[in-house]
Image: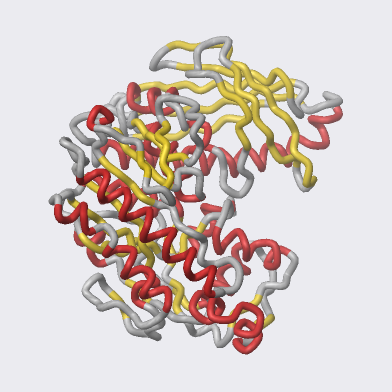
């Protein structure tokens, strides 16, 4: 059987080919509703290079080991890989790149496959495989097109060297392949003393240690680490960990980069729209003051901890991030299992606003903030169309074709989750991305339904 998918990309062949050849392309092309797990990967896509990964097998909970080997390579024209070990009897994937005569590229993916027990396997299973490949490659081509457009529209004069904390989290692990496919270098802050490669630096916030130096020559620092606020009761000890995990780390990074002879040109520090607190239907912009909730105070102190960077005149951006939508982690990942079995429910009255953002737009807005020197101070990273809890309940149920008829009473949320439930699940924060819109950012997914369909392959 043969599957093909073609797309026209408004970028030179060389740029489209190099995007695929750089580290991180495989991760960026992995659909979030069915992500693959890379076990081992050789450098580049030259013939003989292998990739070993785990993939899901239909509805089965177990994963299948897949080993692919690159077999052909013609720079700026094509490369090919084949299955060495995996679920298919035959799998040969050819990627071709052809100029469209107008400065752009025709990208084609062609897969020649045969199922086990061929020809009977193809006879009975090919239709479902072709349907699944259609979903996957629609996602892959959309991601490739949007990522390349983002890189070309905001291309710095030279590749960036980025220092990142929280690199192993849901956001960090999505950002890194976006940066590396664009030709940038990312150095991770790790709490292991056994550094694995030149792109790791040791830090120990508890002891105030951060091992960076002028020779590292970082262009940008992105700080994402912090204790998860959405898990467990907010005991006195938990609250202390939440505060210290943000203040101590932010202060350490800000002091360390401020001491450098060549400080980075930008420091992007994660914060959250929890800064505004429970504000009902009022629309918040970056001009609004801090709320009165526990989370509000946490965010306020978090941002103030970056003052050493500000005093050194390092352009500092506080990323006030909304509810990030990704089936790999966060709120959407927690909602999906109950919605899939028809037990979706609104929370409380359902009237509370949830200011959300898709993972792709979070990546896009962060990259925009890196490259736009006009942006500093607080920047709301949310989609331009916030929704109520009732709206997201109905929309998610509609996208996955399941009913959502239930309500989780507010009293139950308070009983089970306490203060955390009250501030995280029941509070209403309606936020506008005023500054990032004024800076010219164009959202990939401005509306909730489109974002969910993209993220879930629907």
398 and 24: which one is in front? 24
352 and 191: which one is in front? 191
The residue sitting at 79% across, 45% down in the picture is 60
> Percent from the top left, x then y, of residue 256?
27, 44
The residue sitting at 54% across, 83% down in the picture is 350
Please say whether residue 8 is visible from this viewpoint.
no
Compared across the picture, whether 91 is left or right of 29 comes to right
Please say whether residue 432 is visible from this viewpoint.
yes
Image quadrant in which you'd find residue 297: bottom left
In the rendered image, the vertical position of residue 111 relative to residue 8, given as above or below: above
> Percent from the top left, x then y, of residue 175?
42, 43
The residue sitting at 49% across, 70% down in the picture is 239
Image quadrant in which you'd find residue 8: top left
Compared across the picture, whether 55 is left or right of 225 comes to right
The residue sitting at 20% across, 43% down in the picture is 259
54 and 295: which one is in front? 295
Compared across the picture, whether 90 is left or right of 313 comes to right
Q: Quadrant of the N terminus?
A: top right
In the rendered image, the vertical position of residue 426 relative to residue 190, given as above or below: below
């Amino acid at each position: 059987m043969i599957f093909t998918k073609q797309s026209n990309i408004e970028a030179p062949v060389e740029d489209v080919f190099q995007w695929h050849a750089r580290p991180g392309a495989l991760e960026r092309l992995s659909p979030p509703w069915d992500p693959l797990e890379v076990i081992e990967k050789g450098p580049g896509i030259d013939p003989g290079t292998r990739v070993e990964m785990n993939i899901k097998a239909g509805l089965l909970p177990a994963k299948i080991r897949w080993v692919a080997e690159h077999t052909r390579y013609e720079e700026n024209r094509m490369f090919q890989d084949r299955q060495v070990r995996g679920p298919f009897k035959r799998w040969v994937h050819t990627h071709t790149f052809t100029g469209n005569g107008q400065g752009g590229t025709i990208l084609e993916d062609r897969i020649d496959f045969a199922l086990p027990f061929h020809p009977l396997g193809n006879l009975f299973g090919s239709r479902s495989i072709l349907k699944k490949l259609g979903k996957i490659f629609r996602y892959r081509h959309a991601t490739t097109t949007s990522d390349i457009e983002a890189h070309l529209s905001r291309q710095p004069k030279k590749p960036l060297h980025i220092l990142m904390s929280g690199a192993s989290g849901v956001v960090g692990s999505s950002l890194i392949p976006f940066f590396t496919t664009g030709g940038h270098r990312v150095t991770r802050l790790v709490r292991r003393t056994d550094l694995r490669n030149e792109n790791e630096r040791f830090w120990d916030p508890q002891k105030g240690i951060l091992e960076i130096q002028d020779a590292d020559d970082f262009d940008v620092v992105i700080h994402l680490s912090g204790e998860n606020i959405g898990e467990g009761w907010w005991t006195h000890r938990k609250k202390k960990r939440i505060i210290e995990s943000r203040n101590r780390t932010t202060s350490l990074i800000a002091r360390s980069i401020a001491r450098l002879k060549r400080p980075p040109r930008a420091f992007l520090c994660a914060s959250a729209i929890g800064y505004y607190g429970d504000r009902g239907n009022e629309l918040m912009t970056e001009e609004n003051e801090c709320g009165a909730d526990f989370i509000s105070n946490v965010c306020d102190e978090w941002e103030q901890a970056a003052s050493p960077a500000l005093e050194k005149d390092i352009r500092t951006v506080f990323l006030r991030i909304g509810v990030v939508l990704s089936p790999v982690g966060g709120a959407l990942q927690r909602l999906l299992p109950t919605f899939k079995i028809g037990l979706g429910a609104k929370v409380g009255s359902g009237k509370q606003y949830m200011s959300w953002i898709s993972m792709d737009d979070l990546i896009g807005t962060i990259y925009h903030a890196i490259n736009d020197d006009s942006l500093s101070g607080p920047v709301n990273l949310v989609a331009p169309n916030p929704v109520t809890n009732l709206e997201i309940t109905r929309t998610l149920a509609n996208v996955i074709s399941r009913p959502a008829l239930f309500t989780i009473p507010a009293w139950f949320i308070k009983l089970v989750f306490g203060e955390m439930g009250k501030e995280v699940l029941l509070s209403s924060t309606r936020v506008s991305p005023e500054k990032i819109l004024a800076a010219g950012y164009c959202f990939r997914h401005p509306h909730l339904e489109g974002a969910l369909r993209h993220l879930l392959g629907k």
